[in-house]
């Protein structure tokens, strides 16, 4: 039987200025006007740029241009407010400029939002800090040395001698849990809907929740396991559907909706809360 479709309440109330606006994407930590989750291109050439445009009295600067075998032009507003342009290898400069003009309002609004956003502090790995796991926050306690150095049992415990390596310990733990949970969800949806992925891999990607390789390998960032299971399921379904539909056409979204009628709510959750899925 297909996996059940469940509803869920938002994990957090939205904090003013806590998220970066996005347009048509599922990308953590950045805003993008057209770089969908599931693309598989690899950069062929990266150029540091300094080209500036003045559009309706707004100054827009291209900080980096990345050309690759991709088919579409994409704009990414990074966390520091800089603008990265991803373009097909042979895209003409006039095409890139036209796309920037078209998205000028979105670029400006996103950059302004970043300027006024609240900075989420880095973790210090001390007792009392909270860490996300499957949509819930769990408190960390420092304890005498233990093996493994990080344990989870309704809360996190970290050996105090391992505190300087706290980030590595958490990433290792999240990767292990991500592989176990996501592999299980991929298997469940594959069995229910007839997908045949080659394998599941866990990455440390900071700009994608997941991707589908040409050989059928599904890649997911370990950060995804910090989100509610319903959101994990959405990204899993998204990538599985890419095994059949390689683009983000209406046919693609129709296939996603057949499997997950409430996918838009989960997609929105990632846009609003995605920045918090990090340590």
Image (spheres, helix red, strand yellow):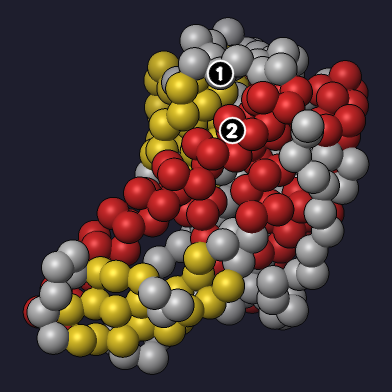
Residue at point 58% right, 30% down?
187
Can the viewer see residue 26 in this picture?
no
Can the viewer see residue 150 in this picture?
yes
Relative depth, front residue between 91 and 117: 117
* Alpha-carbon span between mark 1 and mark 2: 8 Å
**What count of labels does the image hold?**
2
Relative depth, front residue between 153 and 265: 153
Label ID, residue 99: none
Label ID, residue 186: 2
User: Which corner quadrant of the image does residue 135 belong to?
Assistant: bottom right
Label ID, residue 197: 1
Looking at the image, is mark 1 or mark 2 earlier in the sequence? 2
Asked whether, in this view, residue 193 is left or right of residue 37, the answer is: right
Q: Is mark 1 on a helix, strand or loop?
A: loop
Mark 2 nearby-residue class (10 Å; few <14, some 14–19, many ≥20): many
Residue 276's x, y, as percent? 55, 67
User: Which corner quadrant of the image does residue 113 belong to?
Assistant: bottom right
Mark 1 and mark 2 in contact? Answer it, CB < 8 Å.
yes
Residue at point 64% right, 73% down?
18
Residue 143's x, y, as percent? 20, 86
Seen as rendered, the residue at the extreme front is 1
Residue at point 45% right, 77% down?
154
Asked whether, in this view, residue 218 is left or right of residue 108, the answer is: left
Residue 31's x, y, as percent? 64, 50
Seen as rendered, the residue at the extreme bottom is 128
């Amino acid at each position: 039987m297909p996996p059940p479709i469940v509803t869920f309440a938002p994990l957090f109330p939205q904090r003013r200025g806590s998220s970066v606006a996005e347009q048509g994407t599922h990308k953590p930590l950045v805003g993008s006007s057209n770089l969908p989750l599931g693309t598989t291109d690899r950069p062929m050439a990266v150029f540091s740029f300094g080209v500036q445009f003045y559009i309706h009295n707004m100054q827009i600067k291209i900080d980096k241009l990345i050309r690759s075998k991709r088919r579409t032009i994409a704009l990414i507003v990074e966390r520091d407010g800089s603008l990265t342009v991803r373009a097909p290898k042979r895209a003409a400069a006039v095409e890139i400029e036209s796309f920037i003009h078209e998205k000028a309002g979105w670029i400006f609004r996103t950059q302004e939002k970043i300027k006024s956003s609240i900075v989420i502090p880095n973790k210090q790995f001390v007792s009392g800090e909270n860490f996300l796991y499957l949509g819930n926050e769990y408190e960390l306690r420092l304890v005498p040395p233990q093996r493994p150095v990080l344990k989870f049992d309704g809360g996190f415990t970290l050996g105090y001698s391992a505190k300087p390596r706290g980030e590595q310990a958490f990433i290792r733990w999240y990767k292990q849990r991500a592989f176990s949970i996501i592999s299980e969800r991929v298997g469940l949806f594959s069995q229910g809907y007839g997908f045949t992925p080659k394998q599941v891999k866990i990455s440390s990607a900071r700009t994608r929740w997941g991707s589908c390789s040409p050989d059928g390998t599904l890649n997911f960032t370990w950060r995804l396991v910090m989100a509610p299971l319903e959101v994990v399921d959405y990204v899993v379904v998204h990538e599985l559907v890419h095994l059949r539909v390689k683009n983000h056409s209406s046919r693609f979204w129709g296939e996603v909706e057949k499997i997950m009628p409430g996918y838009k709510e989960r997609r929105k959750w990632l846009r609003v809360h995605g920045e918090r899925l990090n340590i």
